[in-house]
Image (cartoon, rainbow, N blue to C red):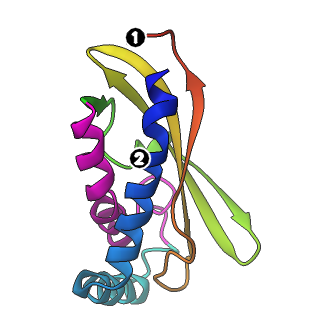
Amino acid sequence: MLALKIYPKLHESLRKGWEDFNDSEEYKLFDNFFEFLLQAGFDESRYRKSIPNPAYDNAAKTIGKHFLATARQFEIYFDEIFPGNFSISEEGEEENFEIRVFYLTAFYRNKPLCLFSIKFSHYHQKFCFPLPPELEIVKLYEKCE
């Protein structure tokens, strides 16, 4: 099945995006922006549950560039903008950080291929993705190869 064949390359590209981002000048920019939002009270506001933190949202999009480029090489596209729809994402706590889980349906040649989950570990009180994003296949759809 195509989803199982391309999964390792997609997973690795997501990890590469995280590694590159952590060593980038963009990281510093988003860290400063996060501090600005924190001082402005964004996390304590009523908006936090329905609007993603702009620093984390844009950082996740930056991390996902390698992932999306790899997906395009395999003619894969998604039903949402990376990393997924914030309003249907889920957040939980693990150890000393939070995990935000997004869902993306992958399509190949106009047919659904699989449902991916992407888990981003993060903190609410400081800007950091302590672990690389995790990609999982949640559901396989009928064969479309």
Asked if residue 40 is positioned above or below residue 84 in the image, the reply reads below
Q: Label for residue 10?
A: 2
Residue 21 can be seen, yes or no: yes
Q: Main secondary structure of the magenta part?
A: helix
Q: Label for residue 110?
A: none
**Element type where label 1 sits in the image:** loop
Q: Label for residue 144?
A: 1
Residue 3: give x, y in percent of width and height.
Answer: 47, 28
Asked if residue 41 is positioned above or below residue 140 in the image, the reply reads below
Q: Amino acid at mark 2?
A: Leu
The answer to whether residue 123 is left or right of residue 29 is: right
Of the numbered discs 1 and 2, the one sitting upstream in the chain is 2
Observer-nearest of 27 and 30: 27
Q: Which residue is drawn at the image coordinates 74% and 67% (left, top)?
A: 94
Question: Is residue 52 covered in magenta?
Answer: yes
Residue 140: give x, y in percent of width and height.
Answer: 56, 21
Question: Is residue 110 covered in magenta?
Answer: no
Could you classify mark 2 by the number of other residues whose Cα lies within 10 Å: few (under 14), some (14-19), or many (20 or more)?
A: many
**Element type where label 2 sits in the image:** helix
Q: Amino acid at mark 1?
A: Cys
Which quadrant would residue 131 be assigned to in this image?
Answer: bottom right
Observer-nearest of 144 and 31: 144
Q: CA distance from mark 1 to mark 2?
A: 18 Å
Residue range in magenta is 45-74
Could you classify mark 1 by the number of other residues whose Cα lies within 10 Å: few (under 14), some (14-19), or many (20 or more)?
A: some
The answer to whether residue 71 is left or right of residue 131 is: left
Where's the C terminus, which quadrant? top left
Residue 7: give x, y in percent of width and height.
Answer: 48, 40
